[in-house]
Amino acid sequence: MNKRWIETMVLVACVAFGLAILFPAAGMARGWGKAEVCMANLHILGRAWLAYPEDNDGKLVNGMVPRDSRYANLQYWMTTYSFGGPYKDNNWWVNPPHNASGLYTGDPAPCSLADEDNGIRSGKLYPYVGTSTAYHCPADVTYLRTPDNSGFGRGGKRTYSITALMHGET
């Protein structure tokens, strides 16, 4: 009976040792998988950014995302000096967050993730990307944070950005 107990203890030790090696390796594999998805998302967004000018007389999408309730009014963007304007177009790669009625919901921050998704889906790159999940790196979990009393502390659903200067506004 003593020999049986020793054999059982050796078996338990071997299983514990195997699990001690397996769990960290699984965590690393999960991290590598998230990194691969993140790189694939950047590839998709880059291809969409390059495809957009082919259909739009060589014009790039506008990298700036305005933060104002008047963003949907084209006349406003063509005449305002706010946000570095006036702009000749409003071909934003993503639009600001807005509700189903089209009203800007980004201030006071944060808005709902559904409103951020509305901004992504109504942006000019979305038809070339086809999914709003490509705008978010799976390793970025800041949008899950609970915001503080002033509404800050939570990241957005969109992880990636394009510099506003890429559009070449004059």
Image (cartoon, grey):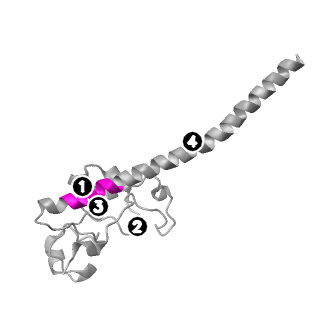
Which is in the foreground here, disc 4 or disc 3?
4
Residue 6 on image: x %, y %:
84, 24
Q: Say whether disc 3 or disc 1 marks the residue closer to the N-terminus.
A: 3
Is 44 one of the magenta-colored residues?
yes
Badge 1 density bin: few <14, some 14–19, many ≥20, Cα 10 Å: many
Q: Earlier in the sequence, mark 4 or mark 3?
A: 4
Element on which disc 1 rests: helix
Picture residue at 51% right of the left edge, 45% below the top: 30
* Amino acid beneath label 3: His
Region rendered in magenta: 42-51
Crowding near the residue tagged with mark 3, few <14, some 14–19, many ≥20 C-alpha atoms within 10 Å: many
For the residues bearing labels 3 and 2, Cβ distance under 8 angstroms:
no
Q: CA distance from mark 1 to mark 2?
A: 23 Å
Q: Is residue 106 visible?
A: yes
Marks 2 and 4: CB-CB under 8 Å?
no
Q: Quadrant of residue 15?
A: top right
- Give residue 114's position: percent from left, percent from top: 34, 53
| Residue 135 x/y as whole percent | 34, 56
Q: Which residue is mark 2?
A: 109
- The residue carrying mark 1 is 126
Q: Residue at x 33, y 52 (%)?
A: 134
Front position among marks 3 and 1:
1
Q: Which residue is mark 3?
A: 98
The residues tagged by marks 2 and 4 sit, at their Cα atoms, a distance apart of 36 Å
Find the distance from the CA under tag 4 to the CA under tag 1.
34 Å
